[in-house]
Image: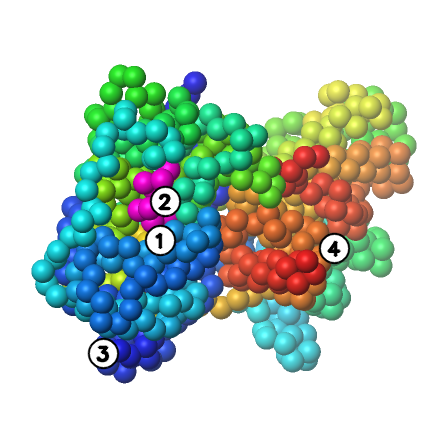
Amino acid sequence: MKLENLTFKGGVDVPHSKALTEKKSLEYAKEPSIVYIPLHQHTGAPCEPLVKAGDKVKIGQKIGESKAFVSAPIHSSVSGTVKNISKITTPTGMKSDCVVIETDGTNEVDESVKPKGNLDNLTPKEIIGIIKESGITGMGGAGFPTHVKLSPPPEKKIDTIIINGAECEPFLTSDHRVMLEMPEKVVFGLKAIMKALGVERGFIGVETNKMDAVDSLRSVIQEGDNVEIVTLKAKYPQGDEKRVIDAVTGRKVPSGGLPMDVGCVVSNISTAKAISEAILEGKPVYERVVTVTGNGVNEPKNLIVKIGTTFQEVIDQAGGFKGVPGKIIMGGPMMGLSQFSTEVPVIKGSGGILVLTEEEALAEKESPCIKCGRCLEVCPVFLQPLYISAFALRKDFEGAERLGALDCVECGSCSFICPSKRPLVESIRFAKREVLAKRKKSQ
Amino acid sequence: MEGKVLNTTKAESAVPDMLIVSSSPHIRSNESVERIMIDVVIALIPAMIGAVYFFGLNALKLILVSAASAVAFEALIQKMLKKEITIKDYSALITGILVAFNLPANAPWWIPVFGSGFAIIVVKQLFGGIGSNFMNPALAARAVLLASWPNIMSTYVLPGADAVTGATPLAIMKFGGVDGTASATVAQAGSNLPSILDMFVGNIGGAIGETSAVLLLLGAAYLIFRKVINWRTPVVYLGAAAIFLAIFGVPADEIIYHILGGGLILGAFFMATDYATGPITSMGRIVFGIGAGFLTALIRVKGGFPEGVSYSILLMNVVSPLIEKFSAPKIFGRAK
């Protein structure tokens, strides 16, 4: 089986822009004096608060929980006093209750934070239980609760686990640094997932622009781990779940389907790290690696940031703004979410904070479609973005749906490549929302 | 920030009140319409130089008049229609050059003016401008000029300073004699044909921009290298033309004359690849090439004219939307 330089059909070559931070070691961010921890950071049901104003909380203490299966508990990232619980808008645009905690500086850790034993002695059920209790969600941005992903219905036989270290988004280096500095945590996380699902085959896929991470991971893999490193051609959107599965296994996830339909589970690097920390240290998700970068900050960095720290505070620790910021993005420039304000908190899915300068952020002038066909060539799902977009712009959402709008993964390759600078994925995304809203209504 | 709801504290921070907020992606490639069109102009330069070398200053005059009038007509009609003037995207310039490339060297100055006017005003702008025309403007202009002034448009000059008129290789093969009218035997016709080297270099009779295969291919290679055009349409077109010519009974040693003679190379690489008027799907481009190759061979062998490239491409332009409809790529992860 070939495991070098694998790839998928379609996609674009993006400027990597990773030089700003790829050589910068992970460092802890300063302890925030106040944190804003949203109770809804994941796909699924929001959590109910377990604390109230005036309560003392410790690091790692559970402060939010839901009875729903598809949800993930929330933990405090600091020790201190709950000031209040208020409504905020999270960086993903969700309205959520938010626990505001003022730090007391003692850094007292909750009693629940203790090692959960070693992998050999844990049953699959116990592993999944630890993952659930630790509030682990897909940390690549999707925020899907990991314990749900690891509980497929019995008719879906899983035989392959893939840890996604493609990190194909330009600018971001958080996964890269984790693979480089904590390879043993990534491999341990993968082995834990393999054990949880009784799978004998695990891969870690890494793009070829991170060969130092490949070496680092290889150096910690032991005989009998059944773990192999796969190098992936550096091409966007290699990190898209279905592209990774296609490149590594050659399997095609059916339209509208999930990785488990082809026997695969894919997890992010930071998720694997979180699983490792949850088992070995008993540490729930209350901090994460955030790449603070872009030409709009003075000192781009890879920081380990407490969940609930405001973007502004994180940016200040990267030397503050260089010039006037134009756009502030959570995530990378291809699929990240631009923010209305820097007074939003870092959440579990915040892998990066990217500051674009005013000049970089200005929209380029749009002109008529010349039918060059580049959007077709780059679409990794083989759609015809120009025609779907044309339907969407005419508000003919049924037409857009007929051409496969719902299969769009919103990677943005079409808009990126378009010589006429047309809003292709932007309009297709709009059509998708409309189609899904209509479906929901008619149900 | 005490107890304050987040998102309302902007005034306290160094962040401007108006951050730019938009849907992703937040970066764009360097691709631009201007850059694509400039590449096409660059690709046409070798053939332009060849045209002047072989057909003299009259060719230069035709190219300049045609290009200038195409740009002027675009500006004029857009001003009259109160639309944004888009001559800076260089697409009108290309249409102008291509109109000139389809003319015999001794055509009078008003021929390219009329041709460019028709191409830009009627074929391009009245159908909505760049990207919206359904026929290749330059080829439609050639068809109209040929129908309106058949004598001017089919009296070709041979290369050289003395500007002697004579038959193109295709006319020689079709009708026999060097003057393009006498009905000689096929054997005689063969002896009247130029050498293959002359055919390849372009030292033959024909429209000013179509004769030099080597210079056109040089430009085409540049366009393929720059990923401005896709190889499928032109390569399949040439291959299909050769195969159908053989099927229609053209002897093997004459097929090379068919490929290098007339407007086939120019048409395949610079006209059939026109974005707006051809299919955008990979399979569609192959079907387009096969169809154009078939029609070209059919017209040349069975039709009344020695040449059939323009009509073939124009006919395929018209069926392109249909081809596209039936050649949509299979969406990832979907069953047939």
| Nearer the observer, A160 or B194 | A160
- Judge if badges 1 and 4 mark residues of a common chain: no
Q: Are the two marked residues, 3 and 4, in contact with CB atoms closer than 8 angstroms? A: no
A26 in relation to B64, above or below: above
Q: Are the two marked residues, 1 and 4, in contact with CB atoms closer than 8 angstroms? A: no
The residue under the point 59% across, 75% down is B84
Magenta-span inclusion, residue A133: yes
Residue on which disc 1 sits? A73
Residue on which disc 2 sits? A132
Could you tell me the amino acid type at mark 4? Met
Could you tell me the amino acid type at mark 2? Lys
What secondary structure is marked by label 2? Answer: helix
Give the magenta-colored segment's residue range.
Answer: A128-138
In front: label 1 or label 4: 1
Q: Are the two marked residues, 1 and 2, in contact with CB atoms closer than 8 angstroms? A: yes
Residue on which disc 3 sits? B2
Residue on which disc 4 sits? B135
Q: Is residue A388 left or right of residue A18?
A: right
Q: Residues within 10 Å of mark 3 (few under 14, many from 20)?
A: few
Real-space CA distance between mark 3 and mark 2, rounded to the nearest whole angstrom:
33 Å
Real-space CA distance between mark 3 and mark 1, rounded to the nearest whole angstrom:
26 Å
Could you tell me the amino acid type at mark 1? Pro
Would residue B312 be seen by someone viewing this image from the given angle?
yes
Residue A72 in picture, x, y percent from top left: 38, 51
Q: Residues within 10 Å of mark 4 (few under 14, many from 20)?
A: many
Magenta-span inclusion, residue A158: no
| Nearer the observer, A128 or B209 | A128
Residue A182 in picture, x, y percent from top left: 21, 37
Q: Earlier in the sequence, mark 3 or mark 4?
A: 3
A200 in relation to B298, above or below: above
Real-space CA distance between mark 3 and mark 4, rounded to the nearest whole angstrom:
67 Å
Tell me the subunit letter for badge 3: B
